[in-house]
Amino acid sequence: MRGRATERETLALLLGRVDYGESDVIVTFLTEELGKVGALVRGGRKSRRRAGGALEPMQTARVTLEDRGGELSTLREARVERPRVALLGNLTALETAGTALRWARHACPPRMPEPEVFAELSLLLDDLDAGAAAGREDALLARFGVRLLEHVGWGLELGQCIVCGKPRPPARAAIVSAARGGVLCVGCAGHAIGAPKGAAEGAVRGALVDAIASHAIESPAEVALALTWVRTALAAHAGYEE
């Protein structure tokens, strides 16, 4: 039995939308206060009056959701709070933003407030819109991905072995398994996963590990490795592969 309807107003980013029936739309928002929520937009395919540009990607919207305790809320009102028009005209920035939004959609659990993820994603979109990320899109995406994993509880333990707790020697190569969640000492790596199997699960220079652990991800090698780790962790934890 559904409960009494309650209305909540919150900032939101559109993570996805699908047509439903002849005229409705089901949207997925990452909201500042409620986390990831699905909402039914009645008549959303025929009329823009209720939602306006809030159902367009990359914009921050202020939405009013009616919740009766079911799987889906109902979108009652939405208006654009922070447009990002410049981002939509930049293909590289648009692809970067789309990747970040997909990562958030798969990593964030339903109806679990994730204000840090919302803030990180909003900042990334702002940087892409302002052109501040020109030429550095992959680096900013890598930093966002590493922080996303940390905020949702999938962060990599890079200071000590995730099996036995032995500290990682500084400035020495480390065996890192993004799928398992972090550093493995030589003994535990040999027992648990056998021989290293490439960049996602193998020996990595200590300087690279330190850079990613401190979010100082700038060089091409740091960026490539961080992106690989993020994608490997998303595949392992959320079953999401690009």
Image (cartoon, rainbow, N blue to C red):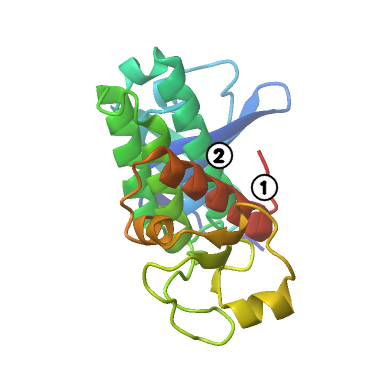
Q: Which residue is mark 2?
A: 102
Please name whichever residue, 198 or 59, is drawn nearer the observer in this view of the structure. Answer: 198
In the rendered structure, the answer to whether residue 97 lies left or right of residue 134 reads: right
- Dot 2 crowding, Cα within 10 Å, few <14, some 14–19, many 20+: some
Quarter that holds the C terminus:
top right
| Pointer 1 with pointer 2, Cβ within 8 A | yes
Q: Is residue 31 visible?
A: no
Residue at horizontal 41 percent and vertical 50 percent from the top: 7
Residue at horizontal 57 percent and vertical 34 percent from the top: 16
In x, y percent, where is residue 58?
A: 41, 28
The amino acid beneath tag 2 is Arg
Q: Residue furthest front?
A: 172
In x, y percent, where is residue 223?
A: 44, 42
Element marked by disc 2: helix
Q: Which mark is residue 240?
A: 1
Q: CA distance from mark 1 to mark 2?
A: 9 Å
- Dot 1 crowding, Cα within 10 Å, few <14, some 14–19, many 20+: some
Q: Residue furthest top?
A: 89
Please name whichever residue, 4 or 147, is drawn nearer the observer in this view of the structure. Answer: 147
Element marked by disc 1: loop
Residue 35 picture quarter: bottom left
Q: Which mark is residue 74?
A: none
